[in-house]
Image (cartoon, helix red, strand yellow):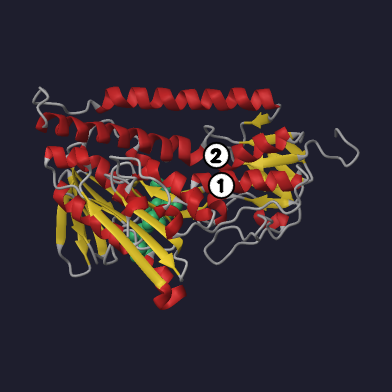
Amino acid sequence: MNDPGGFDYDLIILGGGSGGLAGAFRAAEHGARVALLEPGELGGTCVNAGCVPKKAMWLAADLAARIDIAARLGFDVPESTTLDWREFIVDRQRYISNIHESYRKRLDEAGVTLVPQRGVLLDAHTVRAGGTRLRAPHILLATGSHPVRPDVPGAELGGVSDDFFNWCEAPARVALLGGGYISAELAGVLQVLGTRAEIFARSGRLLQQMDSDVVNQLQDNYRHLGVGLHLEYNVREVQRDGDGLVLVDSAGEKTGPFDQLVFAIGRRANTAGIGLEEAGVQLADDGAIRVDGYQNTTAEGVYAVGDVTGQLTLTPVAIAAARRLMDRVFGGKAGSRLDYDNVPFVVFSHPPLGGIGLTEEQARKQHGDAVKVYRSTFRPMLHALADTPLRSLFKLVCVGPDQRVVGIHAFGEAADEILQGFAVALKRGITLDDLHDTVAIHPTSAEEFVLMR
Ligand code: NDP
């Protein structure tokens, strides 16, 4: 033991994904002795089977769409411009390997001990890692989540998003079950890259928690692209038909065959087999770790961030929560905590859809008739030039006599890049007048937000 309290470290972290790494770096900055336990690749879901490889595939699809536009606009584009997946994946994985390397180097420089083992809590201050026991007064749980499969016969025949990242060529026809983030994103990527993508969602529209106007525009654009949308679809069974897979709905009707089937029906917290009971860490009803507003679990000195808490399961949220937690525990900032309100999000659909704040539906529920909505539907200049049917929809949700902006929503080209700055503005409590007082940047899509009236 290295110190009088019998502790080997000040902080032990289980999980080297977005939350765990952010916590390790920030705690080390504050001078804490940190051990980070990660049996797999550094970076977790985001780097290895999520945001990063997904954005790479999205960028490839975006290029494909632009090549198509270039051909419409007079560029001499060869007839076949299909993507060689194998070649692209080599570049994608090289990029990811560089991230791993950079994390290893940064951990080393920060003096964080990387333990390539799975950690199991023996009590609230002791972790077993392989054959050794490590002790610390503080433990951070950042073990992430995993995709779930539906409980229907034949579910083992389909894959999940992790499997998508192992594909080395474009399948001809793909079914995506679920109407959330992953289905919307993968359907766009696949369809634009030449696959016939079909989404099967049990609800009446995709992305139920997002503003219905922007989602409706996304659905219209997906129909134009040729994405199959099967809404209010309830799967009863998955069957194999020769080389393909067939979905059977609740009425017994079959759709298919598909070359691949991806289940994208949400994720579940990774809480099994890490000694939570032994440490006195309780779970919430959804199976995630129960935390308070400061990321404290029910065991003193044990904290949790990221997907394992089930709170707004987005990478930047895990990072922000971990940094604030470490500022509180080791940085002397007693009140430091993440404000989970007004967190911006983007779905990397084609084109992207994102927003911040209240949807129109939520605002009307909270503020009734005090809500005023402004919308702009337009064709971005490149698409107007190329005469494609793609339309963008930008929307503001305002409340009260001073027209405080409580929601900003966008579906369209560059929405992903535009929204970050507007998220700062909304968080600062701007009004519609503040937007009108800002001179437009012309000609852009972003200017719509300061011109809407
Ligand atoms: P989502 O939570 O986004 O969507 C799940 C979808 O599956 C919903 O349409 C839901 O329907 C449906 N569903 C749930 N259970 C069943 C079931 N038993 N049978 C049929 N349909 C079902 O999950 P995803 O898997 O798409 O993504 C997982 C998470 O990963 C996201 O929630 C997000 O946190 C994160 N993510 C973030 C991204 C980003 O920030 N760009 C990109 C990709 C993932 P209903 O609406 O009716 O409940």
Residue 131 shows in the view = no
Q: Residue at the spot x=64%, y=37% of the render?
A: 37
* Coordinates of residue 182 in the picture (x, y in percent): 35, 49
The quarter of the image holding the C terminus is bottom left
Q: Residue at the spot x=20%, y=51% of the render?
A: 221
Q: Which residue is mark 2?
A: 17
Q: How many callouts does the rendering have?
A: 2
Relative to 389, 28 lies left or right: right
- Ligand 1 near label 2 (Cβ, under 8 Å)? no
* Coordinates of residue 316 in the picture (x, y in percent): 52, 44
Q: Residue at the spot x=58%, y=64% of the render?
A: 284
The type of residue carrying mark 1 is Ala
**Pointer 2: residues within 10 angstroms few (<14), some, or many (20+)?**
many
For marks 1 and 2, the one nearer the N-term is 2
Classify 373 as above or below 245: below
Nearer-the-camera pick, 138 or 68:
68
Farthest residue to the bottom: give it: 369
The type of residue carrying mark 2 is Gly
Q: Secondary structure at mark 1?
A: helix
Relative to 45, 361 lies left or right: left
The disc placed on residue 25 is none
* Coordinates of residue 299 in the picture (x, y in percent): 73, 57
Residue 53 shows in the view = yes
Query: Do the residues bearing badges 1 and 2 touch, measured as CB atoms within 8 Å?
Result: yes
Q: Residue at the spot x=78%, y=36% of the render?
A: 9
Between the C-alphas of marks 1 and 2, the distance is: 9 Å
Nearer-the-camera pick, 285 or 315:
315
Give the image quarter of residue 88. top left
**Pointer 1: residues within 10 angstroms few (<14), some, or many (20+)?**
many
Q: Which residue is mark 1?
A: 318
